[in-house]
Image (cartoon, grey):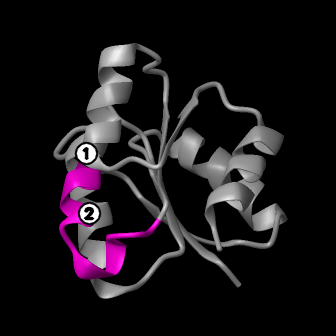
Amino acid sequence: MKRILAVDDSASMRQMVGFTLKKAGFEVTEAKDGSEALNIAKQQGFDAVISDVNMPVMDGITLIRELRSLPNYKFTPLLMLTTESGLDKKSEGKAAGATGWIVKPFNPEQLLAVLKKVIR
């Protein structure tokens, strides 16, 4: 079973992502901000990470940078799921190492299609 780390400061968004992924057969771990996600990611491995951009404590782009610096996450798909659709944020995310960018509100089929594309 593929394992996904879902990171968002909104509990309802985490629930929605978690529900969509669990229904599709993924194992999901949730984190409420980048800092919590980084600690979890250092202790266990994931097949992909889906993160919001704007969060307290540590934002999603900093999280991606931090994850990319860890040997276990050099090639892990890291997806941004955010309301941010501006090109500057997208290029900042890409430069940090984001694999893909999904704009909220998301469509469950779209999220699953993107995941299937990036997870081996």
- Residue located 63% across and 67% down the image: 119
Task: Look at 83% across and 43% down and name the residue there.
Answer: 109
Secondary element type, mark 1: helix
Which x, y percent locates residue 76? 44, 68
The segment highlighted magenta reads 63-76
Q: Is residue 66 above or below residue 13?
A: below
Residue 7 or residue 69, whichever sits in front: 69
Q: Which mark is residue 118?
A: none
Q: Amino acid at mark 2?
A: Arg
Magenta-highlighted stretch: main secondary structure? helix
- Position above or below: 46 against 81: below
In contact (CB < 8 Å): disc 1 and disc 2: yes
- CA separation, marks 1 and 2? 8 Å
Q: Amino acid at mark 1?
A: Ala
| Residue named by callout 1 | 96
Is any atom of residue 82 visible in this view?
yes
In the picture, measured across the screen, residue 79 lies left or right of residue 17, that is left
User: Which residue is pictured at 35% across the width and 39% down the height?
Assistant: 94
Residue 9 inside the magenta-drawn segment? no
Occupied quadrant, residue 116: bottom right
| Res. 108 image quadrant | top right
What residue sits right under mark 2 in the picture? 68
User: Where, quadrant-wise, is the C terminus in this rendering?
Assistant: bottom right
Res 59 seen here:
no
70 within the magenta span:
yes
